């Protein structure tokens, strides 16, 4: 079969229809948003609009735990400070955005000491998370038949892990498990309510993408620990999304071998980004075989290579990935493992992204 592009290609894959060349997704690329407004991405956007399936991100939750925010400029960096009100004392968290980078990085954490922890545990009657339904509708309308919006929401483990300094959090998982579980449950209920409101009220198709599990799976935690901390949440979300015919994506970098069967059994439509070794620990062919038609394997190309490698490096990894996937006869999405978010986009990265997309669409 010839390769297909656009929204219908996604639905064909979900129905188990295999196309070759594979569906190619330049992951997160948004010709209608951030990328399309930047000259250095113009050539990539034009190629993607003509040859690829698009799954640009949309963020229906401004911040998963916080009430109120302010933005200030400082030393050519944008600093965003969030404040949690209604507690016995004022708590805050700060994120910083460096010039030329669209990502926000945590600078100070919500929970820096035991008193902060007890303050969070004592919170009562927090207002429900209200999803931005109009943002998802607007993005779906923009994309049209080019693809679907990826509505990205943090899971409870991802939210709670960022509330503490990293080393403190993982120590507390082992020696303060009961209180961590209480905080996860408290956070998880608000996220679940938000997701149900989003799925129930949006009234248009999208893919619900959960992020945060990569902090809860091997090598951070064992499979059993992951299921203990996250399993029930992920099962509930899959059931809710299924009730409203919303597609779901389980996002996780790194080693996935130990948890693949669990995620497919929960009913997720996609696992991504399936990074190749050494960052990952499973080949595309192994992942496709293990899926047994239960969902779509998505990924295969390490974004670090696209940023730093030579054109010959790109040719080799795309060829090897396609040669690995083709004989399985399973539905597959070829994609890089992360969204490019630097402006201006370096010339090498631009050339490599164009080459990756071209080789993928040729199969």
Image (cartoon, rainbow, N blue to C red):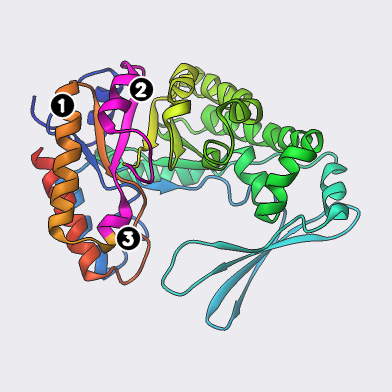
1 vs 3, front mark: 1
First in sequence, mark 2 or 1: give its number: 1
**Residue 46 visible in image:** no
Looking at the image, residue 262 lies above or below residue 332: above
State the SS at label 3. loop
The foreground one among 79 and 273 is 273
In the image, residue 175 above or below residue 266? below
| Classed neighbour count for the residue bearing mark 1: other residues with Cα under 10 Å, few (<14), some (14–19), many (≥20) | many
Q: Which residue is mark 2?
A: 295
List the residue tagged with mark 3: 35
Task: Using the image as rendered, state which of residue 101 and residue 144 is in the foreground.
Answer: 101
Disc sitting over residue 19 in the figure: 1
Is 25 placed left or right of 181 in the picture?
A: left
Residue drawn at 50 percent across, 24 percent down: 241
Q: Is residue 305 magenta?
A: yes
As measured in the structure, the alpha-carbon distance from the residue carrying label 2 to the one carrying label 3 is: 29 Å
Residue at image location 68% in from the left, 34% down from the top: 188
Q: Which residues are magenta?
A: 277-306
Q: Is residue 168 above or below residue 90?
A: above
In the rendered image of this protein, does residue 226 appear above or below residue 133? above
């Amino acid at each position: 079969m010839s390769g297909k592009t656009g929204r219908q290609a996604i639905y064909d894959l979900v129905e188990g229809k295999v196309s070759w060349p594979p569906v190619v997704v330049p992951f997160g690329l948004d010709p209608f948003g951030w990328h399309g407004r930047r000259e250095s991405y113009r050539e990539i956007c034009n190629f993607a609009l003509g040859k690829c399936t698009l799954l640009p991100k949309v963020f229906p939750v401004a911040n998963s735990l916080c009430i109120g925010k302010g933005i200030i400029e400082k030393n050519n960096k944008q600093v965003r400070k969030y404040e949690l009100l209604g507690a016995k004392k004022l708590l805050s968290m700060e994120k910083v955005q460096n010039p030329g980078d669209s990502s926000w990085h945590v600078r100070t954490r919500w929970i820096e000491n035991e008193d902060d922890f007890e303050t969070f545990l004592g919170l009562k009657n927090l207002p429900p998370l209200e999803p931005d339904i109009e943002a998802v509708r607007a993005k779906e309308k923009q994309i049209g038949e080019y693809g679907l919006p990826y509505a990205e929401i943090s899971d409870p483990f991802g939210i709670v892990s960022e509330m503490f300094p990293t080393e403190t959090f993982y120590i507390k998982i082992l020696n303060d498990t009961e209180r961590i579980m209480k905080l996860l449950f408290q956070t998880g209920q608000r996220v679940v309510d938000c997701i149900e409101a989003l799925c129930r009220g949006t009234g248009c198709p999208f893919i619900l993408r959960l992020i945060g599990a990569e902090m809860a799976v091997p090598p951070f935690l064992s499979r059993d620990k992951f299921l203990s901390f996250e399993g029930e949440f992920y099962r509930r979300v899959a059931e809710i999304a299924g009730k409203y015919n919303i597609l779901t994506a389980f996002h996780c970098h790194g080693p996935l071998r130990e948890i693949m069967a669990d995620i497919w059994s929960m009913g997720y439509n996609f696992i991504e980004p399936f990074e190749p070794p050494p960052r990952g620990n499973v080949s595309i062919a192994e992942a496709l075989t293990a899926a047994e038609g239960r969902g779509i394997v998505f990924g295969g190309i390490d974004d670090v290579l696209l940023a730093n490698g030579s054109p010959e490096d790109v040719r080799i990894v795309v060829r090897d990935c396609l040669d690995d996937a083709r004989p399985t006869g399973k539905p597959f999405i070829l994609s890089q493992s992360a969204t490019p978010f630097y402006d201006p986009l370096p010339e090498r990265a631009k050339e490599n992204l164009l080459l990756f997309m071209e080789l993928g669409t040729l199969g």
